[in-house]
Image (cartoon, helix red, strand yellow):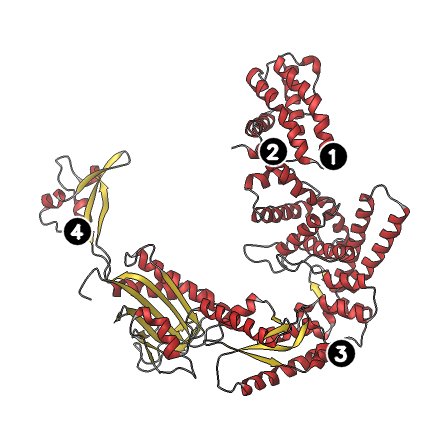
Amino acid sequence: MTNPTLLDTLLVELFVEELPPKALKKLGDAFATVLADSLKAQGLAAADAAVTAYASPRRLAVQVAQVATKAADKAVAQKLMPVAVALDANGAATPALLKKLQALGVDVSNPAAAVAGLQRAPDGKAEALFLHSTVAGATLAEGLQKALQEAIAKLPIPKVMSYQLESGCELPGWTSVSFVRPAHGLVALHGSTVVPVSALGLQAGNSTHGHRFEAAKSPVVIAHAEAYAATLRDDGAVIASYAERRAEIARQLQAAAAQVGGGCKPIEDDALLDEVTALVERPNVLICAFEKQFLEVPQECLILTMKANQKYFPLLDAAGKLTNQFLVVSNISPADASAVIGGNERVVRPRLADAKFFFDQDRKKTLASRVPGLAKVVYHNKLGTQGERAERVRAMAHAIVNQLRMATTPFSVDDKDHFDMLDHKVQEAALLAKTDLLTDMVGEFPELQGVMGGYYARHEGLRDGVAIAIEDHYKPRFAGDELPRNQTGTILALADKLETLVGMFGIGNLPTGDKDPFALRRHALGVVRMLSEKNLPLDLVPLLQSAVPAFGDKITDATAALADFIYDRLAGSLREQGYSVQEVDAVLAQRPQRLGDVGQRLAAVRAFAALPEAPSLAAANKRVSNILKKAEVAVDAHVNPALLQEDAEQALYAALQKLKPEADAQFQAGDYTASLQTLAALRTPVDAFFDDVMVNAEQDDLRLNRLGLLKTLQLAMNQVADLSRLAA
């Protein structure tokens, strides 16, 4: 490397034993990003240099384009000390300055010459002396060694292993190192030149290893950094790129499904696809099958056992029903794949047989017979058993039905029959909802709780509405999940989530940072979605308060804190949907109790903000809020017309008298957009009021009357949202 400015592609690869599959993508991205960023920070690569990450089960690698063999030298100005400290009255160097220069390696044998080489420059209110020097740019070997160490140190390793180095390594003997998995090779190529760096007891070279069984050559020699992926593919039978390997697996899955025919398609599961991508280096998708008798078992059970235990892709027919065929992503490609197919079919059969056994055994006992067993299962040491929890959910569900009953006006005989029947179904579903936790199937696959309860309820002949409610009461389980399908299920799901939220807040068991073991954030979003998307006529705070009595003396009432928590989750959700911070803040500042109204309020605020009157009225609203906050006494919305002396305040009062009733009626009818647009006509009298009227008059009665007028204005303007939040 004689040319200090030579640019070429750099390749770095760590060859290791099989990496943890669920962490592979993060490991690969982090290794590439940290190493490349370090090179860029040292001036060895341009800020916009192309970076390509590679990650396979046995390697982490990165390619960085246009890397220099040596970074450019840098001119550095180093502040020494203030001139008043560095120089005496005659301008000669003080002992403090000479000591500082000597520590920096400057020759001080001739103090005058040393001082002459320094520069004065302003530093705040005084002058300081600066030493200007040139720092040599790092060589690639130096810079890459630093970058490699940083990349290894900052890897998001889920669990570190300690292992002894092999004989012949850089650090022989009993020396051990710690890494995510034992490392066996290091490649560092700048173009076709090996960069002399080391890591984990390994010296860099230009050779690696390909597929364990199908590599054409061993070792695989990388002739040039840019030939890395192609050489590994041709000589090593490895697709080094995680993204390319994932895309190839997805392509082969679709092709295999098309080969089966009948409109079949592989189950969609990004997490499974990611994990399988991290398990194979050269994917080969094969079609397998199991006995059709297993299809008598609920398909959720079979799908889960195939995905979770075997990493297979079940095949669904055109109607979304499970077929008896499935796809395997193999890491080998033999000429005759029958042995591989047969082996996978033999492996899956006992898994499916276990699922069938669990299903058959569970159906021998009714859900109702399992209810007493819930009293033996601890839910939380401060909140009691699952049996106590089920009773609390029943009480909360009953309270929700009554709140819905009271919100229905006018109330008819048919409505009474409907709510009586609804309450009966909700109570039955709440009693049985947690009983599937005691079944063998849910014991083996906890992810199926609720789902299996629904199957067992149907098997017993329970009403379909109750079975659906039992199945759906955990919904929504995750972001974007569907909501419960019927009213019974919605009420039960709402009660179940409220039981968790109210209980955990009541004992002070709140989420901290990224730790949320009881998924309270997810539960809160579930409550938000059900109340808003189902447009339930339930007020949030009374709903939360109605859940507290079910706990007796086990908790303290934390309704206020829980309501804030739910509004915070709602605010985050709305911002993710594209609403601005100002729009969301304006609406939620009023703490709307009916969450189903929030969308309409946001639409009204957005329409109002587009009006030409909006900026002026928002600014005036903010001014009103500030004036009222500073008032020395509590202000109510009362105005005595006889005390209105100025033309501008009389005009504002008259405008309010005219427009407020119309706007109030529109608000009560739920036409929030029209209500705000009606109030937009207040712009002219409001502007005139602030131009011509002194609010804080010396006479007490005039001042209080004007404050009352402003309070009336504030209440009229801020029913839909706090418009002051829209002010710039």
Q: Which residue is mark 3?
A: 360
Q: Which residue is mark 4?
A: 102
Mark 3 vs mark 2, foreground winner is: 2
Disc 2 marks a residue whose amino acid type is Phe
Residue located at (67% from left, 50% from top): 528
Q: Position of residue 155 (x, y in %)?
A: 42, 65
Q: Earlier in the sequence, mark 4 or mark 2?
A: 4
Mark 1 vs mark 4, foreground winner is: 1
Number of callouts: 4
Residue 314: assigned label: none
The Cα atoms of the two marked residues, 3 and 1, are separated by 56 Å
Label 3 SS: helix
Query: Along the horizontal axis of the image, is 639 left or right of 576?
Result: right
Disc 4 marks a residue whose amino acid type is Gln
Q: Position of residue 674 (x, y in %)?
A: 67, 32
Label 2 SS: helix
Instruction: Name the residue nearer the viewer: 131 or 555.
Output: 131
Q: Earlier in the sequence, mark 3 or mark 1?
A: 3
